[in-house]
Image (cartoon, rainbow, N blue to C red):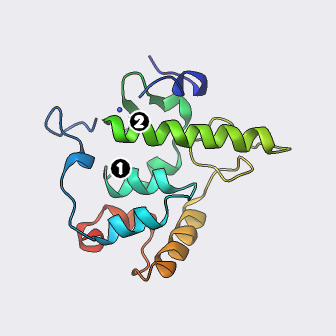
Amino acid sequence: MLVGLGELLAGAFVVSGRRKGMSVLEEPAAIGSRLDRLLEGAVTSRLHLALVLVGKMKMDAGTVLDLRWLQVALDRRVITTRDGRVGFGEPIAGLLYWHATRQRMDHMHSRRWADAGMVFVNQYGTRFTAEQADAALAQYCLMLDLPVVPLAGLRHPVWAG
């Protein structure tokens, strides 16, 4: 059963096709890898969770940006996409919880909110397009002296290493 935003704050996620009990986040990362530096430097970004889902969990960038809260079941630790289910562990559950909390705070302070159902929105509730996400990511890459990469490029080990 899928849960809404209200239930989202009470719950927690694993990736299909991986060995049971092991998530991507538990795999050892290269010390000082580009992806690790990016995630550390972009921790305050509204797209931080998207960077984790694409870079660490290897989810499709378009699928991530199109995620709706109804697709996220924290209690079962699973995200349902058009291509199947993606499971996750406690670290992702925690990121989802705080992402939802920040979004609810933005929603309370906004005079207008475009769509409460989207997971990745700006401070006014408008969903991020791929172009906006790529532009924001490019700013972080430049600020951190990393090669500029589009969101979809975070899945590739050549860049992330």
Mark 1 residue crowding within 10 angstroms, few (<14) / some (14–19) / many (20+): many
The residue positioned 39% from the left and 53% from the top of the image is 52
The residue positioned 68% from the left and 36% from the top of the image is 116
Quarter of the picture containing the C terminus is bottom left
Give the SS element for disc 2: helix
The mark total stands at 2
Q: Which mark is residue 93?
A: 2
The residue positioned 54% from the left and 21% from the top of the image is 7
| Disc 1 from disc 2: Cα separation | 16 Å
Quarter of the picture containing the N terminus is top left
Q: Residue furthest right?
A: 111
Residue 25 x %, y %: 27, 48
Q: Is residue 92 visible?
A: yes
Q: Residue furthest top?
A: 1
Q: Earlier in the sequence, mark 1 or mark 2?
A: 1
Give the SS element for disc 1: loop
The quadrant in which residue 89 appears is: top left
Image height of 25 relative to 108, above or below: below
The residue labelled by disc 1 is 59
Q: Which mark is residue 74?
A: none
Q: Are marks 1 and 2 in contact (CB under 8 Å)?
A: no
Pick whichever, 90 or 127, lies toward us: 90
Q: Is residue 119 left or right of residue 154?
A: right
Image height of 111 relative to 48, above or below: above
Q: Is residue 85 visible?
A: no
Q: Residue furthest left?
A: 19
Q: Is residue 78 left or right of residue 6?
A: left
Image height of 98 relative to 131, above or below: above
Residue 2 x %, y %: 47, 21
Residue 11 x %, y %: 45, 24
Query: Mark 1 belongs to which amino acid?
Result: Met
Residue 129 x %, y %: 60, 58
